[in-house]
Image (cartoon, rainbow, N blue to C red):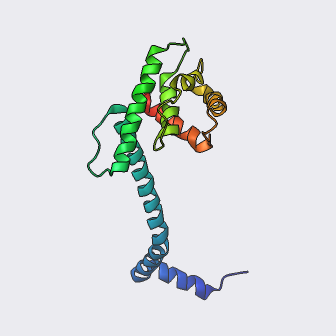
Amino acid sequence: MAVPVVVVKAIAVAATDKNVQKIVAVIIAALLMPIIIVILMICALVSGTESANQSLLDYSFKGVSMSQEFNDEQRGAVENMRDWLTELNTVIAENESGYSLDGDMVRAVFYCLQFGVEITADFDYDGFCECFDGLNIEQLDEALQNISEKFPQYEITENLRTAVQNVYEYLKQ
């Protein structure tokens, strides 16, 4: 099916006319603008979430002073995590039972499982560390399985695995 000569001439004239080019550009921009805005919003959200997560890690692991914008609940969660990590670090350092531990992996898993929740005063830190005996980060699934068996209250999800990997990389910096 051939395109009529009149249509070809009209397209050629329109393509060379500056006013027509501007109108076509404005129409294309108007059609693409909602898509561009959605992409920019998603990028901003992801960036903001990553920044917030990085700050929580700094507050918890490095003892960076907390922002004044934190409410009491947020401040309490970070302070609890600091206290629990201190206790966990003591158990890792003492290594009383003679287990071979990747301390950063233990800390990363503990952080991901415990942040924002309450643990009891009689939490079994030694038992938690035993779940990692002789394992490294490549054997994370086995460690998480051990935790699931010894501490059935924890739900092991794919998101948890990803979070542990991210916190582990943070601790290795």
Q: Is residue 68 above or below residue 109?
A: below
Of the 4 image quadrants, the one containing the C terminus is top left
Of the 4 image quadrants, the one containing the N terminus is bottom right
Quarter of the image holding residue 58? top left
**In the rendering, at what x and y percent does residue 112 appear?**
50, 38
**In the rendering, at what x and y percent does residue 28 appear?**
48, 74
Residues 37 and 7: in front is: 37
The residue at the point 59 percent across, 88 percent down is: 6
The residue at the point 42 percent across, 44 percent down is: 53
Visible in this render: residue 100?
yes
Q: Is residue 146 above or below residue 162?
A: above
Residues 21 and 97: in front is: 97
Visible in this render: residue 173?
no
The residue at the point 54 percent across, 81 percent down is: 11
The residue at the point 37 percent across, 41 percent down is: 78
**In the rendering, at what x and y percent does residue 55 appear?**
36, 42
**In the rendering, at what x and y percent does residue 25 appear?**
44, 75
